[in-house]
Amino acid sequence: MTIKADVLRDFYYRALVAVGTETEEASITADSLIDADLHGLETHGAFRIPAYVRTAKEGALDPKGKPQVEWRKGAISLINGNNGWGQPAAELAVSEVIANARNSCLGAAGIYNGNHIGTCAYYARIMARAGLVGFVTTNSPPNMPPTGAAEAVLGTNPICFSAPATGGRVITVDMATSVVAKGKILLAAERGEAIPEGWAVDKDGHPTTDSKAALGGYLLPLGGPKGYGLALFADIFSGVLTGAEVAKNLKPMYAPKVFKSGIGAFLFGIDTAPFGAGDVSARMDKLIEMVVGAKRAEGVQKIYLPGEIEASTAERRKREGIPVSAAVLANLNQVAGELNIAPLPPA
C-alpha cells in the first residue's frame, strides 16, 4: 500500500516516544527514517522500526540516551552517543563537522558508544548543502569475511561521499562495502523472496539464492579484496580512531537476544570556500557536463549522476506517498499493538 510521508513519519515518532524517547531525539530519528523511505531505501526506514523498538524494550539501547561532545581538539570533535539512538549522535556530529570546517576549512567528528545511524547519505547531503565536500562511514556487526577467510569478521560497513553542485543539487555516493547491503537480504527474507546469486554464501560457504540461508551465512565483499579493504578502513575510521567497538566485538540488533551494539561512526568535511566557491562550482559544472554528456550506450536514454535517481524518487514520493510492502506494514502494526499506539490507517 502507499502511505503519505507525514503519516508514516508521525507513526515513527509516536513509536519512538512510546518506548521512552525524548521528543527531540524522536523527531531527529523519525526524520532520518522517513528520508530513507522517501529515497527508496525501505531497508533503512519502515523495515527498521520493529528491531529499533525491540532493542529499546530489551534495554540494549537507552532511548533516553542523549549524545554529547566529549572533546574538541583543533578541527576534530569526539561524540559519546551514550548508547542512545544513532541518528541524534550523527546529526550532532554533522553540526560539529560544519562548525569545525567553517573555523578551520576542514572538520571531522567521530562517534563512539553509538547505535545504527540510518543511511550515511542523509548526513552527507546536509554537509553538501552547507558547501562541504563530505565523507561519512560507520561500522556494523560482522557478516562479511576478509578475503581468504571462512568466517565473518567485518561488517558491510558503508562509505559515503557527497559534494555540492549548482542549482542546489547534491552528488552522493552511498554504498555498502559488500556486494549488497544486508538490509536488502533482510527485506527479501521478510518477503520470502530469493536473492541474486553472487550476493552471499550459506553457513558452509556455498553460493546461495536463498535469502534465509544467506542470513545464516555471510555476505560477499564488493569486488573481492577491494571491498574487504574498504570495509577494513571503515572500521579503522569508525572504531579504531573513535574508541568504539570493532569487527567481531560489535553486536547485531537482529540476534535472538539483543546486546549493546557499540557502533561507531566517522564524518569529515572540507569547505569549498577556500578554493573559491564560484570557481569550484564552475569546475563542477564542467565535470558534470562531461559525465552526463558522454556518448550513451545502446538503449540508454540518460546518464544519471550518483544520487540523482534517489533524489527524483524522493520528490515523487513526497507527492504520491511511500509504498510499503504488506509484510512490513503488518510488522509495523504489530508494533503499534505492542506499544498501544494507533496503527497505520488503511490506504
Image (spheres, rainbow, N blue to C red):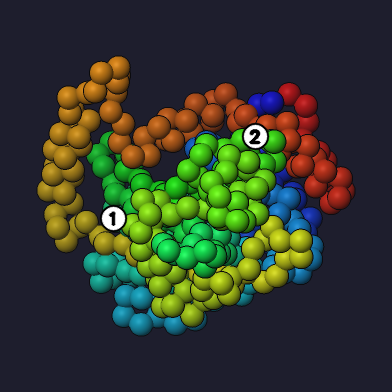
Q: Which residue is drawn at 28% across and 70% down?
A: 103
Identify which amino acid the numbered label 2 is placed on. Answer: Glu
Front residue of 113 and 176: 176
Front residue of 231 and 18: 231
Q: Residue at x 80, y 40 (%)?
A: 333
Q: Is residue 99 left or right of residue 31?
A: left
Q: Which residue is drawn at 69% across and 57% down?
A: 254
Q: Say if 267 sits above or below 199 in the image.
A: below
- Does dot 1 land on a helix, a strand or a loop? strand
In what quadrant of the picture does the N terminus appear? top right
Picture coordinates of residue 324, whole percent (x, y):
66, 32
Q: Return the disc, 1 or 2, that comes first in the chain's sequence.
A: 1
| Circle 1 Cα neighbour tier, 10 Å, few/some/many (<14 / 14–19 / ≥20) | many
In what quadrant of the picture does the C terminus appear? top right
Residue 258 circle label: none
Picture coordinates of residue 53, whole percent (x, y):
74, 56
Q: Say if 267 sits above or below 315 in the image.
A: below
| Circle 2 Cα neighbour tier, 10 Å, few/some/many (<14 / 14–19 / ≥20) | some
Name the residue that disc number 1 marks: 133
Identify which amino acid the numbered label 1 is placed on. Answer: Val
